[in-house]
Image (cartoon, grey):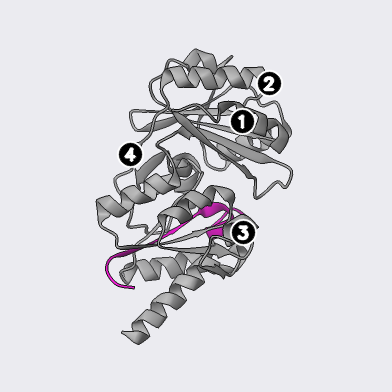
């Protein structure tokens, strides 16, 4: 491997353990590698509000990809450096389809470098747990509205996120699939076997485009990616080399150059350490 390289990893199910935390081993190993000159970042479905706290103590030296590529955030400067918005008219189309199928969830906007999250009601136990964890553990601010349509004329809407069964969410995804200005990803929750996530965002927003932006703006010759779930397929497509943790879904493993140790065994950190050590020996 020659030239300037970047390692980039998904968080949940990949870099994080089942406790949704970075292990001391992963944090210490990556910090040592970063101090020795490697470039490392993350690409996650999480928003800045929760991911920044999870990443505390990890000395990242590259902007990070949040919300499956909707935004790119510079931790050092504590600001969004790139974001992809959903046009207001398109947001209204999405909300109309949600109402038709009796689906609700969370709607995200960015104003003055601050993320704002709206919800209509917490109508399922899994939504309540999701909300409680982010409020109590991460101090994430949420704002209740009677209807998303109240905010549908906002020019800064960036993301919709829903948690429900596959069958219910798939109906929404199918109805919106031909909309020219948005894209979506439907994938299983790594923490709740029977729950799926549907994420809706701008057509221009993806882990693929975000990683491409990092490559072009920072001049990387080689990018090595790590993931576990269906929403990591765009990440893999943007990378020169792709590695799936052993707990990854089969669809992702099929696209990987190799399989590494699982997320609870510090697979990503161990792989990078071994690779860099081998490189030093050869050098």
* Vertical comparison of 82 with 98: above or below: below
Residues 34 and 275: in front is 275
User: At numbered mark 4, what does the secondary structure look like: helix, strand or loop?
Assistant: strand
**Which one is earlier in the sequence, the residue at label 2 or at label 1?**
2
Residue 48, can we see it? yes
Residues 80 and 194: in front is 194
User: How far from the left and from the top, in percent, is residue 205?
Assistant: 42, 38
* Vertical comparison of 4 with 251: above or below: below
Which residue does the image show at 35% across and 50% down from the upper left?
Answer: 212
Q: Residue 174: which disc?
A: 1
Q: Which residues are magenta?
A: 1-21
Measure the alpha-carbon separation of dots 4 and 1.
Answer: 28 Å
Where residue 112 sits, quadrant-wise, is top left
Image marks 2 and 1: residues in contact by CB distance under 8 Å: no
Residues 187 and 180: in front is 180
* Vertical comparison of 8 with 209: above or below: below
Residue on which disc 2 sits: 102
User: At numbered mark 3, what does the secondary structure look like: helix, strand or loop?
Assistant: loop
Which residue does the image show at 48% across and 49% down from the upper left?
Answer: 234
Measure the alpha-carbon separation of dots 3 and 4.
Answer: 29 Å
Which residue does the image show at 52% across and 53% down from the upper left?
Answer: 11
Q: Residue 9: which disc?
A: none
**Which one is earlier in the sequence, the residue at label 4 or at label 1?**
4
């Amino acid at each position: 491997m020659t030239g300037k390289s970047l390692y980039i990893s998904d968080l949940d199910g990949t870099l994080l353990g089942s406790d949704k935390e970075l292990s001391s081993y992963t944090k210490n190993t990556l910090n040592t590698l970063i101090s020795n000159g490697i470039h490392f970042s993350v690409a996650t479905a999480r928003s800045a509000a929760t991911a920044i706290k999870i990443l505390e103590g990890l000395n990242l030296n590259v902007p990070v990809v949040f919300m499956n590529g909707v935004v790119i955030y510079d931790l050092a400067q504590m600001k969004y450096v790139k974001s992809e918005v959903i046009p207001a008219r398109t947001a209204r189309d999405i909300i109309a389809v949600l109402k038709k199928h009796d689906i609700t969830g969370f709607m995200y906007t960015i104003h003055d470098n601050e993320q704002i999250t709206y919800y209509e009601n917490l109508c399922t136990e899994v939504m309540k747990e999701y909300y409680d964890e982010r409020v109590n553990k991460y101090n994430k601010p949420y704002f209740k509205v009677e209807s998303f349509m109240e905010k549908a004329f906002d020019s800064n809407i960036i993301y919709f996120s829903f948690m429900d069964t596959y069958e219910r969410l798939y109906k929404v995804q199918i109805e919106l699939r031909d909309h020219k200005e948005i894209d979506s990803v439907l994938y299983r929750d790594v923490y709740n076997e029977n729950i799926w996530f549907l994420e809706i965002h701008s057509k221009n927003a993806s882990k693929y485009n975000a990683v491409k932006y990092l490559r072009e703006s920072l001049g990387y010759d080689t990018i090595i990616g790590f993931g576990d779930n269906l929403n990591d397929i765009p990440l893999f497509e943007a990378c020169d080399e792709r590695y799936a943790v052993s707990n990854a879904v089969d669809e992702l493993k099929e696209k990987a150059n190799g399989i590494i140790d699982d997320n609870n065994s510090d697979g990503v950190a161990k792989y990078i350490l071994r690779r860099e050590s081998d490189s030093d020996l050869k050098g």
